[in-house]
Image: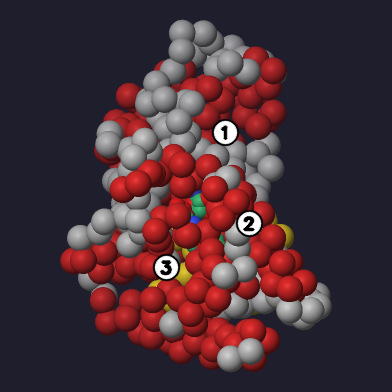
Amino acid sequence: MKKKIFSGVQPTGNLHLGNYLGAIKNFVKLNNEVSNDCVFCVVDLHAITVTQDPKKLRDNIYETVATFVASGIDPEKSIIFNQSGVSAHSETAWILSCTARMGWLNRMTQFKEKAGKDKEKASIGLYSYPVLMAADILLYDTTHVPVGDDQKQHLELCRDIAQKFNNDFTADNFFRIPEPLIQKEFSRIMSLRDGSKKMSKSELSDLSRINLTDDKDQIINKIKKAKTDTLPLPSTSAGLEKRPEAKNLMGIYSSLIDENLDMTIGKFSGKNFSEFKENLSQVLVDKITPISSEIKKLLKEKNFLDQILKKGREKADRIASEKLKKIQEIVGF
Ligand code: TYM
């Protein structure tokens, strides 16, 4: 069966190594497998669930497209577009919000984290965010959704919504039930300053993450300053337990060069952090600086990026509006 791939990234700036290793690297791999139909969406409707500066949002949309292309997604093979350009996403989200249950959304941990203590002040969009995400996925008859570990619960909700809709309207198999594609190891890259916290765009300290636009000196400096502990590196994976920073840094190394963690552990067993960090910096510089220079180059070619988005929107709109028409018929419009 042909795999249908859909995934999204928010244009909220500071795309980082976590986004790359958790999601975008996998997008590139899926884009390169000939038998896949891939759709990669810049989810600008999701971005405005928290306050955005309109000028910065526009710049960040371009930067996200540039990051996709610079990382190796081929816009001739995959559909790249921005969510607000295809109105079927918002319309379907409304219909699905009448299928989703409050109880289901109340369980979403990401809402609780993002809304913080003062839930009353969070936007309604932030609360219903996973319903829009379900609309994104279901409109394209998606079979597989490559995401980082933090999106797992949203994917489960999407599956529940699809199943309930199919049951409620006795429309067997109308919505395909999508599978998450989450890497087994290191699907959650942690902050360089605190190994118990996720690497994130919103973390105040820039030293906590490697941005995909960082240059060589910035990468070397951030790895030099990355938090470690005082022990030498272990000889087995069990030795990484209760050492979150060592585990994260070794995981980043192994994930970047596509080797399994045990091999990385074997290479650096008994060595100190300074020697390991030199190797890690080298691997990061080799992998990230070509992407970072390409992003900067592409950002000077706005016409080219506009063309990619325009073509992508047209293709996405054709697929999504056809599915929406069927949804409208099923619900009785
Ligand atoms: P977003 O924009 O927060 O993140 C984009 C992708 O990066 C992954 N990611 C990470 N992976 C590993 N370690 C980290 N520290 C890390 N930080 C982020 C995320 O898991 C994600 O895959 N809701 C989504 C966007 C979205 C979407 C969709 C995804 C909207 N509609 C439909 C899939 C399908 C989000 O906010 O991702």
**For residue 264, above or below residue 62:** above
The mark nearer the N terminus, 1 or 3, is 3
Which percent across, then down, holds residue 52? 25, 59
Disc 1 designates what residue?
A: 251
Please give left or right for residue 104 compared with residue 48 in the image.
right
Q: Quick one: label 3, few (<14), some, or many (20+) residues within 10 Å?
A: many
Asked which secondary structure carries label 2, the reply is: helix
Disc 3 designates what residue?
A: 42
- Residue at left 60%, top 77%? 139
**Viewer can see residue 69:** no
Q: Amino acid at mark 3?
A: Val
- Between 219 and 279, the residue placed more toward the observer is 219
Q: Are marks 1 and 3 in contact (CB under 8 Å)?
A: no
Is the C terminus in the top left, top right, bottom left or bottom right quadrant? bottom right
- Residue at left 48%, top 80%? 91
Q: Amino acid at mark 2?
A: Leu
- Residue at left 65%, top 15%? 239
The mark nearer the N terminus, 1 or 2, is 2
Residue 301, image quadrant: bottom left
Q: Amino acid at mark 1?
A: Gly
Query: What scheme was used to colour the molecule?
Result: secondary structure
Q: Are marks 3 and 2 in contact (CB under 8 Å)?
A: no
Asked which secondary structure carries label 1, the reply is: helix
The mark nearer the N terminus, 3 or 2, is 3
**For residue 136, above or below residue 313:** above
Q: Are marks 1 and 2 in contact (CB under 8 Å)?
A: no
Is the N terminus in the top left, top right, bottom left or bottom right quadrant? bottom right
**For residue 186, above or below residue 62:** above
Please give left or right for residue 18 compared with residue 45 in the image.
right
- Between 220 and 121, the residue placed more toward the observer is 121
Disc 2 designates what residue?
A: 157
